Amino acid sequence: MKSSVLISAAVVAVLIGGGVAYFLGGRDARAPEAEETPPSATHDAASTPRVPVEAAQSATPERSRQLALEIERALVARDPQQRETAFNFLLPELLRAEPARAVDIVARQEPGETRDALRDEVTRQWITVNREAAIEWIGSLEVMERRASATIAMRTLAASDPAQAIDVADRFGVGRDDGSLEHMVQIWATENPDAAMRWIDRQPPNDPRTAQLKSRIEQVRAQQRGMSQ
C-alpha cells in the first residue's frame, strides 16, 4: 500500500512538471511574436502627420487670393498706414507669386488717385522683378497711363541699370521731351563714365537719339578731365 502511494505521487509530480514546462515553453515561443509589432511603434506610425501633395500645391493660389483681398481692403479703407503696409509687404509677395492678380486689382480701380498710386507701385516693383512682363503690361495700358507707368519704370531702372532705363524710355517715347532722360544719363556718366561710354560704343552710329546722349556723356567726361588737370 505504501509503495503504490509513492508511485502515484511520483506520477503526479512528473505530470505537473511537464505541464509547467509546456506552459513556460509556449510563452517563450510566443514572446518574439509579440515583440515584432510593439503597440507603441504602431501608434507612432499612425499618428505621424503627413501633408498631402495636393494641399501643398493648393496653398499658393489660396495665399495669392488672400493677399489680393487684403490689398483691396487697404485701398478701400483709404488709411495711409494700411496702404503703405499693403504696398510694402503684401504687393511684393503677390507680384512674385501671381502678378496677374495684381494686374486685375489695378483694372478694377476707378480712375483717380487710388488707381494711380496702385498702378505706379505695381510698375515700380514689377519692373525690377520681371522686366519684360512689366513692359508688356505697361504697353497694354491706355495712352496716359502708359506714359505715366513708363516714366516710373524708367526712373526705377535708372538707379540699378541705366542702359535698361534708356531702352524702356525709347520703347514708350518718354523722358526726352522733359529732359529727364538726358539728366539721368548725365548722372550715369558722372558716377560711372566707363560704363556709360561702353554703352554708347554699342549703339548704332547714325541714331540721332544716341548722338544726343553721347554728346551729354562726352560733355561730362570733358568736365571731369578739366577738373583733374
Image (cartoon, rainbow, N blue to C red):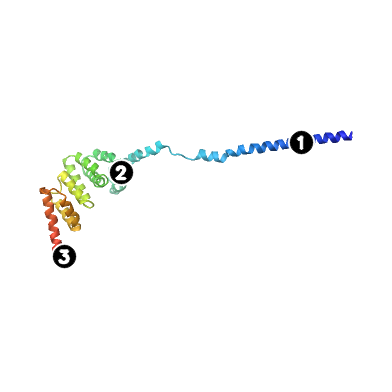
Q: Secondary structure at mark 2?
A: helix
* Corner quadrant of residue 139: top left
Q: Does the image show residue 177?
A: no
Q: Residues within 10 Å of mark 1 (few under 14, many from 20)?
A: few
Name the one closer to the observer, 180 or 211. 211
Q: Residue at x 11, y 51 (%)?
A: 211
Q: Which mark is residue 96?
A: 2
From the top left corner, tell me how far across and down residue 4 is, in percent: 86, 33
From the top left corner, tell me how far across and down residue 53 is, in percent: 41, 37
Ranked by sequence position, the earlier of labels 2 and 3 is: 2
Q: Hey, what amino acid is under mark 3? A: Ser
Q: Residues within 10 Å of mark 3 (few under 14, many from 20)?
A: few
- Please state if 80 lies on the left or on the right of 25 as rendered: left
Name the one closer to the observer, 168 or 22. 22
Q: Residues within 10 Å of mark 2 (few under 14, many from 20)?
A: few
Ranked by sequence position, the earlier of labels 1 and 2 is: 1
- Please state if 189 lies on the left or on the right of 61 as rendered: left
Q: Are marks 3 and 1 in contact (CB under 8 Å)?
A: no
Q: Are marks 2 and 3 in contact (CB under 8 Å)?
A: no
Residue at the right extreme? 1
Q: Hey, what amino acid is under mark 1? A: Ile
From the top left corner, tell me how far across and down residue 23 is, in percent: 70, 36
Of labels 2 and 3, the one closer to you: 3
Q: Secondary structure at mark 1?
A: helix
Q: Which mark is residue 16?
A: 1
Task: Calculate the distance from the C-alpha at mark 2 to the C-alpha at mark 3.
Answer: 46 Å
Q: Does the image show residue 144?
A: yes
Q: Hey, what amino acid is under mark 2? A: Arg
- Please state if 132 lies on the left or on the right of 59 as rendered: left
Q: Which mark is residue 228?
A: 3
Name the one closer to the observer, 41 or 94. 41
Ranked by sequence position, the earlier of labels 3 and 1 is: 1
